[in-house]
């Protein structure tokens, strides 16, 4: 006897994808996204991590804080300046404010249209700071303690 899921269930109102479709979708998502802890680990592990980090926010936002070593190129200027600032042979990882902002996705789209390989850093600058990674401001380098809602406290990583 099988039970039928009520159509009022908002999670299952649309049935989950087949396992094969889920493998294709989630497997492909890694080609488009990187999370802040993976970006931080790659930057810490190598003098040349093999990618460029690009902050797509405004100048006042950049001055407020940014990932150390990132290149500043606001989304609105990508089309006109990316060719002079970036090497098309080096992948670019874009970020903006955080998960509530799609500026990094817009910058990534503009870069892809120009022929760059690109990924978006999920969580953006917000999660970079919330996970306790060092950042630069116009006053110098800073670091906040990890937010226990977004990063493991007292552990090297979250285990995922």
Image: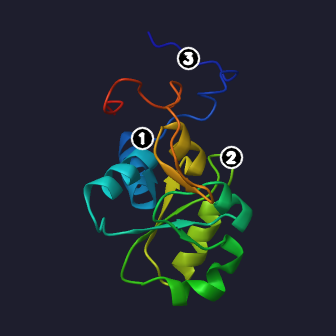
Outermost residue toward the left in this view: 46
Q: Position of residue 125 (x, y in %)?
A: 58, 50
**Residue at the spot 31% in from the left edge and 53% down from the top edge:** 44
- Could you tell me how far apart the alpha carbons at marks 2 and 1 are, in whole angstroms? 29 Å
For marks 2 and 3 on the same chain, the one whose residue lies earlier in the sequence? 3
For marks 2 and 1 on the same chain, the one whose residue lies earlier in the sequence? 1
Residue position marked by numbered label 2 in the rendering: 100
Image position of 78 (left or right of 136): right
Quadrant of the image containing the N terminus: top left
Q: Position of residue 10 (x, y in %)?
A: 67, 26
Residue position marked by numbered label 1 in the rendering: 18
Quadrant of the image containing the C terminus: top left
For marks 1 and 3 on the same chain, the one whose residue lies earlier in the sequence? 3
Q: Which residue is nearer to you in this view: 96 or 43?
A: 43
**Residue at the spot 48% in from the left edge and 84% down from the top edge:** 115
**Residue at the spot 35% in from the left edge and 57% down from the top edge:** 43
Label 1: state its secondary structure: loop
Do the CB atoms of the residues marked 1 and 3 lie less than 8 Å apart? no
Q: Could one spot residue 40 in this view of the protein?
A: yes
Residue position marked by numbered label 3 in the rendering: 4
Do the CB atoms of the residues marked 2 and 3 lie less than 8 Å apart? no
Indicate which label's residue lies in the foreground, 1 or 3: 1
Q: Could one spot residue 102 in this view of the protein?
A: no
Image position of 14 (left or right of 132): right
């Amino acid at each position: 006897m099988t039970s039928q899921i009520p159509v009022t269930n908002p999670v299952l109102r649309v049935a989950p994808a087949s396992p094969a479709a889920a493998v294709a979708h989630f497997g492909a998502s890694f080609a488009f996204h990187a999370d802040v802890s993976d970006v931080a680990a790659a930057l810490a592990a190598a003098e040349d991590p093999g990618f460029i980090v690009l902050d797509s926010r405004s100048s006042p936002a950049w001055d407020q804080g940014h990932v150390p070593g990132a290149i500043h190129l606001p989304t609105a200027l990508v089309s006109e300046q990316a060719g002079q600032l970036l090497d098309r042979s080096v992948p670019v990882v874009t970020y903006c404010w955080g998960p509530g902002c799609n500026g990094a996705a817009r910058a990534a789209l503009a870069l892809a249209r120009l022929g760059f390989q690109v990924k978006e850093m999920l969580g953006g600058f917000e999660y970079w700071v919330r996970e306790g990674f060092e950042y630069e401001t116009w006053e110098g380098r800073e670091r906040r303690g990890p937010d226990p809602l977004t990063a493991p406290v007292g552990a090297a990583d979250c285990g995922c």
